Image (cartoon, rainbow, N blue to C red):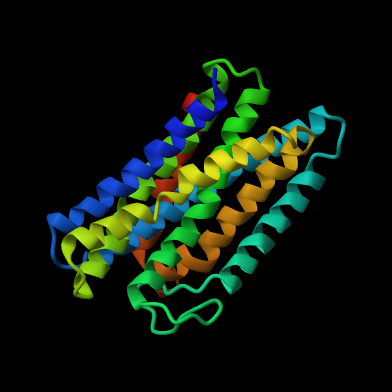
Amino acid sequence: MNIIWMALQGTGFAFLMTTLGAALVFLFRKEMKESVQRVMLGFAAGVMIAASVWSLLIPAIEQAEEAGMIGWMPAAGGFLLGGAFLMFMDKLIPHLHVGAAETEGMHASLKRTTLMVFAVTLHNIPEGMAMGISFANSALQGGGFADYAPAFALAIGIGIQNFPEGAAISLPLRKEGIKAWKSFLCGSLSGIVEPVFGVITVLMAGFLAPAMPWLLSFAAGAMIYVVVEELIPEAHLGEHSHAGTIGVMAGFLVMMILDVALG
């Protein structure tokens, strides 16, 4: 099977779900209720945590051990590098989180709406990388239809949590006074980095096959960084938010079932 085509299908589904979520701006003019936002953000965090463990870290450890290495070493090393990479990107790229007053990253004279789109785009980069690495790993395992099942499970899980993410960018932009069609376009395009980085990662992984355990855990570290740095604080889980906590547990459960059932 053509690995690029397979990766485009998986990452394309995730991008489509972001677009469908952004389209909610045509149905609702007001921002989502805070409790709904907490559930959705918590759900996204749960999906990413489960995906990092079942789809990325566990395969990284297993493959390292099969290659005669100490399983936890490349998993731990790649995990730390992934977190460090996202921390660097967080400091480098100017962005503004929804509801925040101050811009993060390097100073740039950009519109508030542009900075808000950058924030979600930065969040989506590790998701695209994770899917790309997962598809590349599936190809190395044989490339048969069954070998791609774990990668598609990851793409489905990320796609599901991308739906509320699309709405989370388009609805606030609409509230800021941006026209509905432009808010939709911004929300949709924030997810385009997933197929782009997914395919780039697949192409790079082809030359770095021996380092696959490092690459898998690198993607896991990047995703966990996003969860801890952005999703959990934005879900206000520190305020004993039952809605956010339920969202995390539901997202974790859905992603775990997808990975085990399809993997």
In percent of width and height, residue 82 lies at: 67, 55
In percent of width and height, residue 208 lies at: 75, 37
Relative to the observer, which residue lies in front, 245 or 178?
178
Q: Residue furthest front?
A: 109
- Would residue 28 appear left or right of 18 to someone viewing this image? left
As drawn, 133 above or below 95: above
- Would residue 31 appear left or right of 123 to someone viewing this image? left
In percent of width and height, residue 115 lies at: 41, 72
Tell me which corner region of the image, top left, top right, bottom left or bottom right, holds residue 171.
Answer: bottom left
Tell me which corner region of the image, top left, top right, bottom left or bottom right, holds residue 234.
Answer: bottom left
Whether residue 52 is visible, yes or no, is: yes
Q: Residue at x 72, y 57 (%)?
A: 81
In percent of width and height, residue 232 lies at: 46, 65
Q: Residue at x 54, y 76 (%)?
A: 105
Q: Residue at x 51, y 24 (%)?
A: 149
Relative to the observer, which residue lies in front, 74 or 244?
74
**Position of the N terminus by quadrant:** top right
- Would residue 37 appear left or right of 23 to someone viewing this image? right
Q: How many marks?
A: 0
Relative to the observer, which residue lies in front, 146 or 245?
146
Whether residue 254 is visible, yes or no, is: no
